[in-house]
Image (spheres, rainbow, N blue to C red):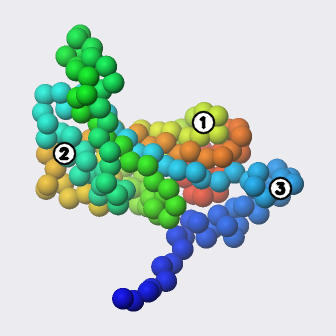
Amino acid sequence: MSTQKLSKPRLKTLYTDKVRGDLTERYKYSNPHLVPKLEKIVISTGLKEALKDKSVIQDAVYSLSMISGQMPVKTKARKSVSNFKLREGQDLGAKVTLRGDRMWDFLDRLNTMSLPATQDFQGLPKKFHKGNYAFGLSRCECFQEIDFDKVKHVIGLNVQIVTTAKNEDECFQLLSALGVPFKK
C-alpha cells in the first residue's frame, strides 16, 4: 500500500498564504480566529418535474455526484399539499454539502472553468445575506464533468457559499480575493 502525499488545493494555498494576511491587515483583526474563512458549500436542486417522472431525480443525483465528487442526498417533502399533488415523503430534489479540500476544489473549478463557460456570463450579482453568498444557475451545462449523453433532464442548481464573515463587506472581500467573478 503506497502512501502518496496529495497536494493542497490551489485556492486553499492562496487563502493561507495571501488572502488571510490581506484581510487581517485590512480589518485589523487582533485574533487570527476572527479572520473570515469558508465553512462549506451547499449545492442543491429542487425538481417539480420529479412528481411526474422518477428519472428526473436519478438524473439530478448523477449530475450532482459528477459535479461534486460525492454522493448527494435526496430531499423529501416534509408535508402533503393537495393543491400541488404533493405527498409527504416524496422525493423532490437533491443536495450535497462540500467541506475541506473538495470545497476548495469545487470553488476553484467554478471560478475558473464553469462560470466563464456559461452563455452571456456578465458576473455574479453582489447580493449577500449575513456574511454568506447564494446564487442560482438555471442550467448545469457549464460543468464539463457531466456526460450529457447519460442524462435526459438538464437541471438547475442553487449554490450557497457559507463563510464565517460577520457582514457583507467582509464576505465580499473574501470571495473576491478568492476569485469569485462579481459584476463590475
Residue at (63% x, 68% y) in the render: 14
Quadrant of the rendered structure where residue 18 is? bottom right
Q: Decide: marks 1, 3 in contact (CB < 8 A)?
A: no
Query: Which circle marks residue 75 in the picture?
Result: none
- At numbered mark 3, what does the secondary structure look like: helix, strand or loop? loop
- At numbered mark 2, what does the secondary structure look like: helix, strand or loop? helix
Q: CA distance from mark 1 to mark 3?
A: 24 Å
Q: Which residue is mark 2?
A: 58
What amino acid is found at the position of numbered circle 1 in the picture?
A: Phe
Residue at (78% x, 58% y) in the render: 32
Residue at (26% x, 51% y) in the render: 63
Q: Is residue 183 left or right of residue 143?
A: right
Q: Is residue 119 left or right of residue 166?
A: left
- Kindly give the residue lying farthest to the bottom in the view shown: 2
Q: Which residue is mark 3?
A: 31
Quarter of the image with the N terminus in it:
bottom left
Quarter of the image with the C terminus in it:
top right
The 10 Å Cα crowd at callout 1, few under 14, some 14 to 19, many 20 or more, is some
- Kindly give the residue lying farthest to the front in the view shown: 1
- At numbered mark 1, what does the secondary structure look like: helix, strand or loop? strand
Instruction: Name the front one of labels 1 and 3.
Output: 3
What amino acid is found at the position of numbered circle 3 in the picture?
A: Asn
Quadrant of the rendered structure where residue 179 is? bottom right
Q: Nearer the viewer, residue 55 or 183?
A: 55
Quadrant of the rendered structure where residue 165 is? top right
Query: Which circle marks residue 128 in the picture?
Result: 1
Upstream in sequence: badge 2 or badge 1: 2
Q: Is residue 181 above or below residue 169?
A: below
- Kindly give the residue lying farthest to the top in the view shown: 83
